[in-house]
Amino acid sequence: MQVRLVLLLAAFAATPAVADVVAVTPGSFEISQTVTINAPVANTWDMLRAPQKWWNKDHTYSGDSANLYLDSQATGCFCERLPGGGSVEHGRIVHLRPQKMMRLNAALGPLQAEAVTGTLTWTLTAEGENATRIKLTYVVGGHIRGGAEALAPAVDEVMAVQMLGLKSATEAMPAPEAQPAKE
């Protein structure tokens, strides 16, 4: 476990990324993170829509990322199957622009037990033909028992782990096959 954590931290340190708690009040916070993924936008988009392949299992209710799924359309559920027939809704898609942007209403993890609204947005931008800049913004507001000041840095760290998982999984995808030139 320690070796895996060291490798994860080393990989993240080598990743061109910007992570920041942009704003925080007693009842709200905003997180912004940007990562460059060495893969075309189409690959990054496909992987973003498959959280079971990249979301860290330590941040699931079941302990198994394979139980996650995302119905990638407006009103689509970012959900998780639980043992014994249970389930969890992590978020719901409210705006989708294929290969450009996905927005969810999502009170993730411990925020689910608070009286808050969370808006999670991923924006993808091509950086040439074979790289994607992906920006995550997560804006949370409402009544947070204990205040947002203590929670925001922890949520920022968890989302940084998820962004690294997305980057790693996407970059591990096979390169798309070259299409023959049209004559």
Image (cartoon, helix red, strand yellow):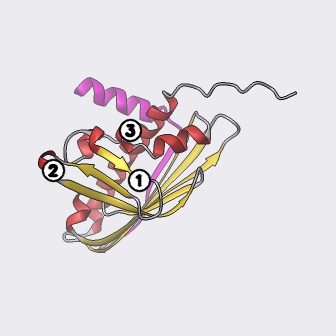
Tell me the element at label 3.
loop
Write down the region rendered in magenta.
1-25
Residue 90 rendering spot, x and y as whole percentages? 30, 57
Disc 2/disc 1 C-alpha distance (Å) = 19 Å
- Residue at 65% across / 34% down in the picture? 130
Q: Earlier in the sequence, mark 3 or mark 2?
A: 3
Q: Which residue is mark 2?
A: 85
Q: Which residue is mark 3?
A: 54
Residue 160 rendering spot, x and y as whole percentages? 39, 46
- Residue at 38% across / 38% down in the picture? 54
Which callout, 3 or 1, points to the residue nearer the camera? 1
Q: Earlier in the sequence, mark 2 or mark 1?
A: 1
Disc 3/disc 2 C-alpha distance (Å) = 23 Å
- Residue at 31% across / 63% down in the picture? 107
Q: Earlier in the sequence, mark 3 or mark 1?
A: 3
Residues packed near mark 2 inside 10 Å, few (<14), some (14 to 19) or many (20 plus): few
Q: Which residue is mark 1?
A: 71
For this rendering, which residue is in front, 14 or 47?
47
Residues packed near mark 3 inside 10 Å, few (<14), some (14 to 19) or many (20 plus): many
For this rendering, which residue is in front, 47 or 9?
47
Name which residue type carries label 1.
Asp
Residues packed near mark 1 inside 10 Å, few (<14), some (14 to 19) or many (20 plus): some
Name which residue type carries label 2.
Gly
Residue at the right extreme, as displayed: 183
